[in-house]
Amino acid sequence: MRERDLGTCAAEMDGATLSAWRDVVLPPAEMERIHEHVVRCATCQTQLAEYNGVARTLRRQREIEPGDRIVEAVRRSIAHQPPRHWTPSRRAWRSLSALASVAALTLLFVYVLGSDAGADPGAHDRPVGLHAGRASAGRLGLQGPDRSGLDTA
């Protein structure tokens, strides 16, 4: 609310200070000093009279309460509503699918890294077919061609 210009106060008392004095929320020494000023200042007296008018108007306002008719209508409305069951929303399904994707990628990552964990460190340096073929043939009891006479130059 904007204060009206009611004239000039000799002590340049502002509205907030006058309101605080009226509400008795200032220290006792300040309350006494402002009281001595207000009894001689017509401008401050006019401002206080307006504050008193606003306070009287506010006290006359009645509180609005819902009547029994409204309260009963709300209770009946709530009682007649069927119970709600939770159903997942699109957002919940999107979150669930994102979580499943992350879990699948994590498992794939662990599987790929785990398959190399127990491998022979030098296995990547050797050709796969040559050693794997001899090991498999030896386990099965098969003999390959004799290559002892081959030249290895």
Image: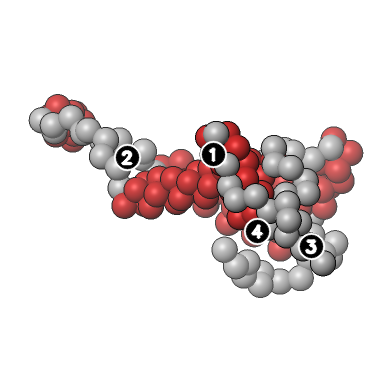
Mark number displayed over residue 47: 4
- Expressed as whole percent of the image width and height from the top left, the position of residue 67 reads 21, 33
User: Nearest the camera: 134 or 97?
Assistant: 134
The residue drawn where x is 62% and y is 45% is 134
Image depth: mark 1 or mark 4 in front: 1
Q: Quadrant of the C terminus?
A: bottom right
Q: Which residue is mark 2?
A: 64
Task: Give the structural element (helix, strand or loop) at label 1.
Answer: loop
Q: Which residue is mark 3?
A: 152
Q: CA distance from mark 3 to mark 4?
A: 116 Å
Q: Of the residues under marks 1 and 4, which one precedes in the sequence? A: 4
The residue drawn where x is 44% and y is 45% is 100
Q: CA distance from mark 1 to mark 4?
A: 116 Å
Q: CA distance from mark 3 to mark 1?
A: 23 Å
User: Nearest the camera: 97 or 152?
Assistant: 152
Q: CA distance from mark 2 to mark 4?
A: 30 Å
| Amino acid on which disc 1 is placed | Leu
| Amino acid on which disc 2 is placed | Ile
Q: CA distance from mark 3 to mark 2?
A: 107 Å
Image depth: mark 2 or mark 4 in front: 2
Task: Give the structural element (helix, strand or loop) at label 3.
Answer: loop
| Amino acid on which disc 4 is placed | Gln
Q: Which residue is mark 1?
A: 142
Q: Does 14 appear above or below 123?
A: below
Image depth: mark 3 or mark 2 in front: 3
Image depth: mark 2 or mark 1 in front: 1
Q: Of the residues under marks 2 and 1, which one precedes in the sequence? A: 2
Q: Quadrant of the N terminus?
A: bottom right
The residue drawn where x is 38% and y is 52% is 94
